[in-house]
């Protein structure tokens, strides 16, 4: 379908990747595909125990005395779909749509984050005439959940000490640092009692905008978990209720779009007008809220359990905590109240916290822990990674800026991003490695409206090729 798009081989490989289900944690098939491509090209190819792939292409004959360069991206993708869309991320291909200058799909995430990096890398490997030093294409697993692939990369796997991470989302912006973070997980043991109410209802919130919890946390996009509690406050204005369950969110790094609340009451029906409440969320213009009667539940949560859950939802912070003093438009510290899940007699809360400043990182972590402890929620801190700190001196960064100016006549912006990037992990293993992150223009990654700009992809690919020639 993409055969007429340029660069042709980049979009060829991207389309091949969309045929392979590759949700985080389900990367065996795509890893095997990348291994087979490397072998078919005649290059040394490594597949490690974590399904990371390294493909080594020798230097062009004019570059044999140049130091090797690493091109890096991740093979997994966030699996999100719009309400009502039927798609099985374990077996279905991603259907592609061309809409003007945008490449999109049908109500699911596209996987351009970060399939486009992989496609660019493969196209460079395939081009026998490309001029560059020796190339090591590193493609990692599980970036979107835990960065387990990046954590598993051993020092001996890479010879290069200059790394081009192609996982940024705005053309003309070079990322030279990112926040650190961890997940603050909470577990609450709950009790149940016999349901003494006449009826049971389901309150559903669907199709909020959602989005990337690092890149879009400052945009005041609604959180379905927070909204659910406010909707329950509207229910309570009519009559008392007893909570059966409340769940929502799917990924630690995606702002939750949907939530479902089951509750019992003596009402026969609810005809609540939520329009005034919805109007407070102007970015979530496609949100849907409804209450339906369902099969009567035998049990409800105990009063103490209900209060504890509601207190956590109300008191747990969500959003921006501090902006960077050096870059006032960039978020320094934030959190994403990401998920609530019921598991038999336990309720599990997931909160993803990011910061590029150790002081605000600790402050905000303590605020979350205080809420958990106040409501008898046990907690653990998981998947910690340090910030990728801005390097005062970087020959690679300087050369990239100069090359972009020569190609476009425009100045390249240099930023520190409030999101997790794999260089934050790599710098621990390779402290002497220079790294930059670049990428073509993408919109709404981690959401069903994710899209990739086609002309930007061509320009970014040409920039990468030209930069390699200068290295």
Image (tube, rainbow, N blue to C red):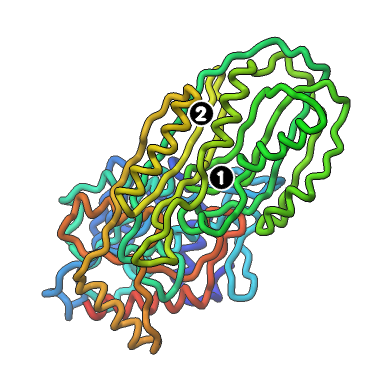
Q: Could you tell me how many numbered marks the image carries?
A: 2
Residue 319 seen in the current view:
yes
Q: Position of residue 422 (x, y in %)?
A: 33, 54
Which residue carries the number 2 mark? 348
> Which of 265/77 is in front?
265
Q: Residue at x 58, y 36 (%)?
A: 314
Dividing the picture into quadrants, the one containing residue 459 is: bottom left
Q: Element under label 2?
A: strand
Which residue carries the number 1 mark? 89
Work out whether 403 lies above or below 77. below
Work out whether 168 lies above or below 408. above
- Per the model, the C-alpha gap separating discs 1 and 2 is 24 Å
Q: Element under label 1?
A: loop
Q: Position of residue 305 (x, y in %)?
A: 59, 20
> Which of 340/80 is in front?
340
Quadrant placement of the C terminus = bottom left
Work out whether 113 lies above or below 233. below
Q: Residue at x 79, y 49 (%)?
A: 275
Q: Residue at x 23, y 54 (%)?
A: 427
Q: Position of residue 172 (x, y in %)?
A: 41, 76
Q: Residue at x 57, y 35 (%)?
A: 313
Q: Is residue 341 left or right of residue 275?
A: left
Q: Is residue 291 left or right of residue 412?
A: right
Q: Is residue 431 left or right of residue 454?
A: left
Dividing the picture into quadrants, the one containing residue 444 is: bottom right
Q: Residues within 10 Å of mark 1 (few under 14, many from 20)?
A: some
Quadrant placement of the N terminus = bottom right
Residue 57 seen in the current view:
no
Q: Is residue 217 left or right of residue 47?
A: right
Q: Earlier in the sequence, mark 1 or mark 2?
A: 1
Q: Position of residue 119 (x, y in %)?
A: 42, 64
């Amino acid at each position: 379908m993409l055969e007429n798009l340029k660069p042709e081989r980049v979009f060829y490989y991207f389309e091949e990747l969309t045929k392979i289900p590759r949700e985080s944690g389900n990367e065996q098939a795509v890893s095997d595909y990348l291994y087979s491509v490397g072998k078919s090209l005649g290059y040394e190819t490594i597949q490690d125990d974590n399904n990371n792939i390294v493909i080594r292409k020798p230097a062009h004959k004019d570059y044999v005395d140049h130091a090797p360069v690493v091109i890096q991206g991740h093979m997994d993708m966030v699996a999100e779909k719009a309400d009502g869309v039927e798609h099985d991320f374990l077996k279905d291909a991603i259907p592609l749509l061309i809409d003007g200058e945008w490449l999109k799909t049908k109500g699911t995430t596209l996987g351009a984050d970060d399939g486009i990096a992989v496609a660019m890398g493969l196209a460079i490997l395939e081009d026998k005439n490309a001029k560059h030093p020796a190339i090591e294409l590193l493609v990692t697993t599980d970036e979107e959940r835990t960065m387990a692939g990046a954590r598993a990369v051993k020092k001996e796997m890479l010879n290069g000490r200059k790394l081009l991470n192609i996982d940024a989302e705005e053309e003309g912006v070079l990322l030279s640092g990112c926040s650190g973070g961890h997940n603050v997980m909470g577990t609450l043991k709950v009790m149940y009692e016999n349901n003494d109410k006449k009826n049971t209802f389901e309150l559903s919130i669907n199709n909020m905008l959602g989005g990337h919890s690092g890149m879009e946390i400052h945009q005041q996009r609604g959180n379905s978990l927070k909204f659910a509690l406010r909707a329950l406050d509207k229910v309570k204005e009519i009559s008392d209720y007893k909570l059966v369950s409340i769940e929502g969110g799917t990924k630690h790094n995606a702002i939750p779009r949907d939530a479902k609340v089951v509750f019992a009451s003596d009402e026969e029906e609810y005809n609540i007008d939520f329009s005034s409440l919805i109007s407070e969320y102007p970015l979530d213009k496609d949100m849907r809220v409804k209450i339906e009667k369902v099969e009567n539940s035998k049990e409800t949560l105990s009063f103490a359990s209900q209060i504890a859950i509601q207190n956590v939802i109300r008191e747990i912070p969500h959003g921006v905590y501090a902006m960077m003093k050096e870059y006032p438009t960039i978020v320094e510290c934030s959190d994403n109240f990401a998920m609530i899940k019921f598991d038999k007699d336990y309720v599990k809360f997931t909160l993803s916290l990011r910061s590029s400043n150790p002081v605000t990182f600790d402050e905000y972590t303590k605020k979350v822990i205080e809420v958990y402890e106040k409501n008898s929620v046990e907690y653990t801190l998981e998947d910690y990674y340090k910030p990728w700190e801005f390097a005062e001196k970087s020959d690679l960064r300087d050369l990239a800026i100069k090359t972009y100016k020569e190609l476009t006549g425009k100045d390249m912006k240099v930023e520190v991003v409030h999101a997790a990037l794999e260089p934050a992990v790599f710098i621990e293993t390779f402290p002497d490695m220079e790294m930059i992150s670049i990428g073509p223009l993408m919109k709404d990654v981690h959401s069903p409206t994710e899209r990739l700009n086609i002309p930007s992809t061509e320009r970014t690919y040409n920039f990468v090729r030209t930069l390699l020639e200068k290295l």
